[in-house]
Image (tube, helix red, strand yellow):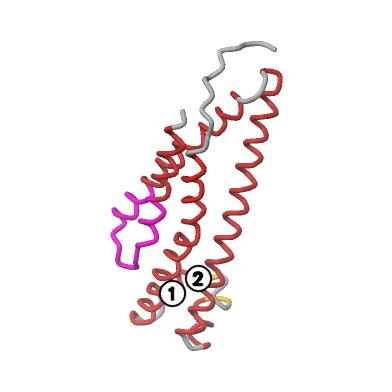
Amino acid sequence: YKTFPILGTAFASIGTYLLSTITATTSFLWVDAYMIILGIGIGCVMPVLTQVAQNAVSARDIGVATSGVNLARQLSGAIGVAVAGTLFTSRIQSALATRLAPSQIAHIGTNGARIDPAAIQALPATLQHTIASIFGTVLPSIFIDFLPVLIIGFAISFFLKEVPLATRTGS
C-alpha cells in the first residue's frame, strides 16, 4: 500500500502545479483535467492513511485510530480552507485597490470582500476584463502557495513504513 501515498502525493502535486498555471483564458476543459489529476492524487492518499493507522494499532484500538485520522483530516481541511480563503480575499482586495479606482470598487461590492456577480455583469466590458484578469492572477497564486506542502508530503511518503496488513479479528 506504500505505493498509493507516493503516487497520490505526486499526482496531487502535479495537479496543484497545473492549477497554478491557469489564467482567465484557460479552457474549462483544461481546468477540469487539472482538477481530476488533483482528485486522483487525493483519492490515492486518503483511504490509505486510515488503513495505515488501523493496521498500526491493536484490534481494540482501531476505533480510536480511525477517529484520530478523521479528526486530523477534518482539522487540516478546515485550516487549509481558512488559510486559502484568507490569502485569496486579501490578495483580491489588494489587487482591486491597486488596479481600480475607489468608485469602481464601490460598484462591485463591499471593498472586494463580497463581490456581486450581477454588479460585475453590469460594468463596461473593459472593467469586466480587468476584474477577470485580477481573479485569473490571484487564484493560481493560491495553488502555488500550497504546492510546498504537497511536495513535503511526497517526500515524507517515502518514509512510510509498510507493515504487512493485519489479518486479525476480534479483540
| Crowd class of label 2 (few under 14; some 14 to 19; many from 20; radius 10 Å) | few
In reply to whether residue 138 is colored magenta, the answer given is no
Give the amino acid at mark 2.
Asp
**First to last magenta residue range:** 14-35
How many C-alpha atoms fall within 10 Å of the one at disc 1: few (<14), some, or many (≥20)? some
Mark 2: secondary structure = loop
Q: Is residue 12 left or right of residue 163?
A: left
Local secondary structure at mark 1: helix
Residue 100's spot in the image, x, y percent? 46, 85
Which residue is located at x 45 percent, y 61 percent? 144
Q: Nearer the viewer, residue 36 or 3?
A: 3
Which of the two residues, 160 or 167, is positioned nearer the viewer here? Answer: 160
Q: From the viewer's perspective, tell me whether residue 130 is left or right of residue 5.
A: left
Residue tagged by mark 1? Answer: 120
- Say if 118 sits above or below 71 in the image: below
Callout 2 touching callout 1 (CB < 8 Å): yes
Q: Which residue is mark 2?
A: 116
* Looking at the image, residue 137 lies above or below residue 20: below
Residue 106 or residue 35, whichever sits in front: 35
- CA gap, disc 2 to disc 1? 7 Å
Q: Magenta-highlighted stretch: main secondary structure? A: helix
Name the kind of residue labelled 1 in the image: Ile
